[in-house]
Amino acid sequence: MPNNFKRGNDFFARFRNRGYPVAIAEGDSWFDYQVGAKFTKTHPTLDLLDYLAVNHDYAIYRVSNAGDTLENMAYGTLGGKTIDKVRQERPSLFFLSAGGNDVVGPEMAHFVNHAQSGLPVLRIDDLRDHLHTGTRRALERIIDRVSTAAPNVEIFAHGYDYPLANGKGAFKLPWGYLKGPWIKPVFKAKEIRDRDEQDHILESLIDEFNDLLQDLDASFANFHHVDLRNQVRRNEWANEIHPERSGFERCAKAFHEKVASVP
């Protein structure tokens, strides 16, 4: 890692000039993790994109923003800076991290029944309807617009790993405010206290989302599902939904291996 490495787009031009594959990255906090960042020369906080750039030699221009939703990416920001940059660079690669904020977190309340309702805890039909209508349409819009702007692009989207309902939020420096927790409050409101049941619900949410990405992988020749499930060890979660550095590094390795497997 360069001693003067900085997060963001500072190194994009330098890496591009070295002949590294060019990628435009749109996404959420897995592509823009600034929580608890220590901007030092020897020990910066890195996210998935940083490890892809530094460990696996990509020139990545990021237009990602922590907390961004898939709907905003598809119908908001995509039409501006993102597509403009894709047209300008004509990249061979487009990386996407989107949908997690639409499934896991406060939105979970729409897919989970109260423990005392006598109903199955997971509203699986509601979840699948949500994923295969609005979520699928938003992803298809991104695929279409990016492919039109760069006809030879290969698009890679990951499906996250199984999060933990550990009640941990994220502390952001230097302002010192707390974000999250995102999951535990939903389970508390629904009186779902059993840890195994919580894990089962979270695994089902992530599995269903990955199933959608696999369906899109089979439907679009230039869209590729990156499976990151079971890459982050249980002790490698910084909080409920973000890995520690070692978890992000392992996810970046799996992401790179998927990219390298595509002719």
Image: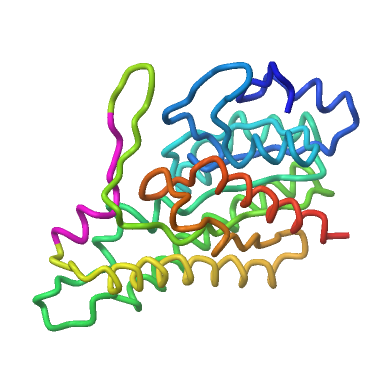
Q: Nearer the viewer, residue 57 or 38?
A: 38
Q: Nearer the viewer, residue 86 or 162?
A: 162
Q: Is residue 185 magenta?
A: yes
Q: Going 38% across and 21% down the picture, which residue do you hit?
A: 173
User: Quarter holding the C terminus?
Assistant: bottom right
Left or right of 89? Residue 79 is left
Q: Going 69% across and 30% down the picture, which residue do you hit?
A: 61
How many marks the image carries: the answer is 0
Left or right of 34? Residue 85 is right
Q: Is residue 55 above or below residue 219?
A: above
Q: Going 74% across and 22% down the picture, which residue do you hit?
A: 2
Q: Where is residue 155 in the image (x, y as percent from the top left)?
A: 71, 52
What is the quadrant of residue 131 in the picture? bottom left
Q: In this view, does 175 lie above or below 109?
A: above
Q: In this view, does 148 lie above or below 5?
A: below
Q: Going 73% across and 28% down the picture, which residue do you hit?
A: 1
Query: The magenta stretch spans which residues?
Result: 178-189
Q: Is residue 116 above or below residue 210?
A: below
What is the quadrant of residue 36 in the picture? top left
Left or right of 41? Residue 29 is left
